[in-house]
């Protein structure tokens, strides 16, 4: 198994518990990805917006992007906006580590080939199942269906 870090932080805030997120990423790799590799970049809004514009032709900041490799291993890359994660954590009343974990799970499900925009609820069900197993609050798909906090 690869011992490289699963997460790269561009500029983590001093208060971010990086070891907690690395543990969570390893748990995702083992449990959800079934020991297949992926990498997560935690970066700022500007870089996420640039990636979204470059790869999806959407000139907006978003919270999480997934870039499947097209191969069984490694699965691909996930990019998370720390700014959006911080704002969403505040809105939802939980820690930034919890929010980054929620976003990482969501991104990983996309890397595994799921797409909530076209799959008739398959990804939403998988996200809910993994949230319960991983002890996470509601995920992105549930939030979208429920509306604003």
Image (spheres, helix red, strand yellow):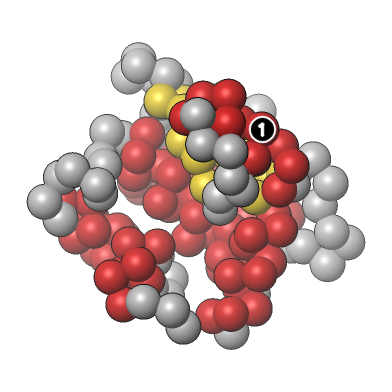
Q: Residues within 10 Å of mark 1 (few under 14, many from 20)?
A: some
Q: In the image, is residue 107 above or below residue 14? A: above
Query: Does 120 sit above or below residue 141?
Result: above
Can residue 64 be seen? yes
Residue lying at 43% horizontally and 79% vertically, measured from the top left: 148
Q: For numbered disc 1, what is the local secondary structure?
A: helix
- Residue closer to the observer: 3 or 110: 110
User: Which residue corresponds to the image point at 58% horizontal and 58% vertical from the top-left?
Assistant: 100
Q: Is residue 87 left or right of residue 110?
A: right
The residue labelled by disc 1 is: 50
Residue 60 locus on image (x, y percent): 59, 45
Where on the picture, by quarter, is residue 41? Answer: top right
- Residue located farthest toward the top when viewing the structure as drawn: 71
| Residue at horizontal 35 percent and vertical 16 percent from the top | 70
Residue closer to the observer: 62 or 9:
62
- Residue 37 in the figure: left or right of residue 15: left
Seen at 11% across and 51% down, the residue is 120
Q: Residue furthest left?
A: 120
Residue 20, image x, y percentages: 65, 60
> Observer-nearest residue: 70 or 38?
70
Total marks drawn?
1
Q: Is residue 136 above or below residue 49?
A: below
Q: Name the spot of residue 79 as percent of width and height, x first.
A: 58, 39
The quadrant in which residue 29 appears is top left
Residue 133: tell me if it is visible. Answer: no
Direction from residue 65 to residue 35 in the image, left or right:
left
Residue 31: x, y in percent?
35, 47
């Amino acid at each position: 198994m690869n011992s490289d870090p699963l997460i790269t932080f561009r500029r983590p805030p001093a208060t971010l518990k990086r070891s907690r997120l690395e543990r969570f990423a390893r748990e995702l790799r083992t449990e959800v990805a079934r020991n297949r590799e992926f990498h997560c970049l935690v970066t700022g809004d500007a870089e996420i917006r640039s990636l979204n514009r470059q790869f999806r032709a959407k000139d907006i900041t978003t919270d999480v992007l997934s870039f499947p490799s097209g191969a069984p291993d490694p699965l691909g890359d996930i990019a998370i906006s720390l700014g959006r994660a911080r704002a969403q954590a505040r809105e939802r009343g939980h820690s930034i580590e919890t929010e980054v974990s929620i976003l990482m799970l969501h991104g990983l499900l996309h890397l595994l080939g799921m797409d909530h925009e076209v799959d008739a609820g398959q990804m939403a069900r998988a996200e809910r199942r993994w949230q319960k197993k991983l002890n996470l609050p509601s995920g992105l798909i549930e939030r979208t269906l429920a509306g604003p906090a």
